[in-house]
Amino acid sequence: MARRIDVTGTDGVRLAAWEFGDPPKSDPRPGHEDTPGVLLLHGLMGRASHWASTARWLSERHRAIALDQRGHGRSEKPTGAAFTREAYVDDAEAALEQLGLTRAVLIGHAMGALTAWQLAARRPDLVSGVVICDMRASALGAASQREWAQWFSAWPVPFATLADVRKWFGEDDPWVERPNPARGEFYAEVMHEREDGWRPVFDPEQMLRTRETWVYDAHWEELAQVRCPALVVRGLDGELGRAEAQEMVRVLPRGQYAEVADAGHLVHYDQPEGWRTAVEPFLDAVWA
């Protein structure tokens, strides 16, 4: 089961956090006061529900909470809100404190991974470990931002059905090199039905504003400031290349490396068992 917990982010933005477990590990029962906590941070355009399979096995022994970040999922999407790096990191910090997560490990995918290591560098007192899933530390540049803007404009919205969503993102999208049903399912989760059909739950312009606050800069300096154990995970067909991933591990003071076969950018979604095999031993070691 999952239950919603409201969190107040920076500038008063209301955020939806989802605690997984049956019963949730936050129940005031003897022996659960010091249950290790995990905060799961999705990537750009993602939502907390994308972590459901991961959160289920985490919740067997840990307090697992996934956050819908500002502009995403069930969290607020104010037109005039800040969509800066600082705002996302501040939100994650507020979530840790308001949720009372103990000895927290941050698990982030893509943009969420960047938020995770930036928060770990800023607040080592709050973070016991970090899992960085398929996020580059190098600058991506202006060309990358233009490509994303063009990609958003190519979406054939509104989609008539969810089946059309799955087919386009899993097969017809020009960015898809070969059929990828998991990718289709991933994007089906971020659509909602309106009178004219299915549209994304997020505002693409807000996503571009969010993205432009990190794509022009490299993030190696903050990576080097992460003092807790950190695991860099990549899919063999993902966006993070092996050479850059291994350099990230070298820069991290306590870095470790793992890769998942037959996985692309959506590692935890493409290969959930391989993802668990890579991540679970790291978590056990952090909390040993």
Image (cartoon, grey):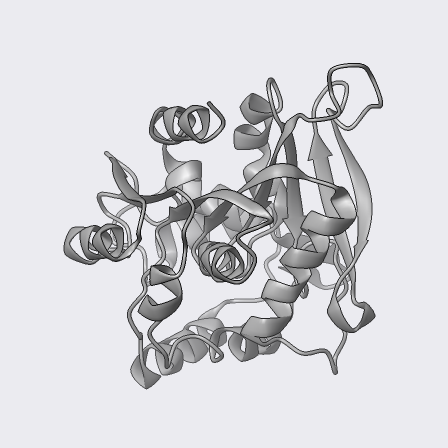
Question: Which residue is outermost to the left?
Answer: 243
State the residue in front, 160 or 274: 274
State the residue in front, 173 or 115: 115
**Residue 201 visible in the current orientation:** no
User: Residue 157 in the image: x percent, y percent?
Assistant: 57, 66
Question: Could you say which quadrant of the image residue 198 lies in?
Answer: bottom right
State the residue in front, 271 or 167: 271
Q: Is residue 4 above or below residue 225?
A: above
Q: Is residue 286 left or right of residue 159?
A: left
Residue at left 48%, top 74%? 211
User: Residue 222 in the image: x percent, y percent?
Assistant: 40, 66
Residue at left 31%, top 55%? 176
Q: Is residue 264 above or below residue 276?
A: below
Q: Is residue 286 left or right of residue 191?
A: left
Count of numbered tags: 0
Q: Is residue 167 above or below residue 223?
A: above
Residue at left 33%, top 77%? 144
User: Residue 258 in the image: x percent, y percent?
Assistant: 26, 37
User: Residue 40 in the image: x percent, y percent?
Assistant: 57, 43
Residue at left 48%, top 49%? 108
**Quadrant of the drawing holding the N terminus:** top right
Question: Could you say which quadrant of the image residue 101 lies in?
Answer: top right
**Residue 119 visible in the current orientation:** yes
